[in-house]
């Protein structure tokens, strides 16, 4: 009987030690970002699937080949090129297709690129003036760089 009690106590101690060890290992993995990176990757994949579903066949083909697509502003008919990314990723294009300037506006929150680009597309195609009213504009040099 004494032997059974000692054995039960040892089993309990080993189980407790194993639980503590697994908890410590989980904490190390969480702090290393492995879990969050995996979640972020899945989120990015879902967002890109959603974005592609909203693109026209021409926009989708362009995005898959060059990682950008063009949209037409709802108010002025201006053409914009939305590049893959989350910041300063919108180029305004002239009638001849030359770069005029860059625009930056993003929705609130820590969103992945696909979600940001979809929000930018919808904003420019439905409320161009409103989107540009809150956007930051930066100019692009029109000629080659001189050193």
Image (cartoon, rainbow, N blue to C red):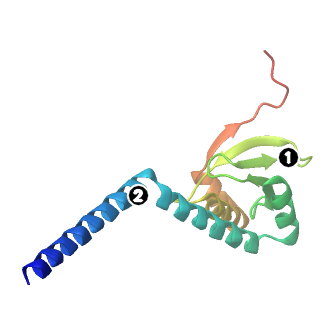
Residue in the image at 53% along x and 57% along y:
37
Q: Which residue is drawn at 65% across and 42% down?
A: 137
From this viewpoint, is residue 77 visible? Answer: no
For disc 2, the neighbor class at 10 Å (few under 14, some 14 to 19, many from 20) is few
In the rendered image, which quarter is residue 15 located in?
bottom left
Left or right: where does residue 66 sit relative to residue 46? Answer: right
Can you identify the residue that label 1 sits on? 94
Q: Which of 13 and 130 is in front in this view?
A: 13
Residue 73: name its quadrant: bottom right
The residue sitting at the bottom extreme is 1
Residue 120: x, y in percent?
66, 60
Label number found at residue 111 = none
Q: In this view, does 35 lie to the left or right of 86?
A: left
Of the image marks 2 and 1, the number of the one nearer the N terminus = 2
Circle 2/circle 1 CB separation < 8 Å: no
Label 1: few (<14), some (14–19) or many (≥20) C-alpha neighbours in 10 Å: few
- The answer to whether residue 92 shows anywhere in this view is yes
**Can you give x and y, in whole percent of width and height, for residue 5 in the image?**
11, 79
For the N terminus, the quadrant is: bottom left
Q: Which residue is drawn at 57% across and 52% down?
A: 134
Image quarter hosting the C terminus:
top right
126 on left or right of 39: right
Cα gap from disc 2 to disc 1, whole angstroms: 48 Å
Secondary structure under tag 1 reads loop
Nearest the viewer among 55 and 127 is: 55
Which element carries disc 2, helix, strand or loop?
helix
Q: Which residue is drawn at 48% across and 61% down?
A: 35
Q: Nearer the viewer, mark 2 or mark 1?
A: 2
Q: Tell me: residue 1, above or below residue 84.
A: below
In the picture of the structure, the residue carrying the numbered disc 2 is: 30
The image quarter in which residue 126 lies: bottom right
């Amino acid at each position: 009987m004494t032997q059974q009690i000692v054995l039960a106590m040892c089993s309990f101690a080993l189980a407790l030690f194993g639980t503590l060890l697994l908890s410590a290992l989980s904490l190390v993995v969480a702090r290393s970002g492995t879990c969050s990176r995996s979640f972020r990757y899945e989120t990015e994949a879902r967002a890109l699937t959603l974005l592609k579903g909203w693109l026209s066949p021409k926009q989708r083909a362009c995005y898959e080949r060059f990682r950008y697509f063009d949209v037409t502003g709802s108010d002025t008919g201006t053409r914009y090129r939305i590049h893959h990314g989350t910041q300063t990723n919108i180029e305004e294009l002239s009638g001849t297709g030359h770069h005029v300037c860059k625009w930056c506006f993003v929705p609130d929150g820590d969103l992945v690129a696909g979600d940001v680009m979809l929000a930018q597309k919808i904003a420019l195609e439905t409320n161009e003036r409103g989107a540009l009213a809150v956007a930051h504009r930066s100019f692009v040099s029109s000629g080659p760089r001189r050193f």
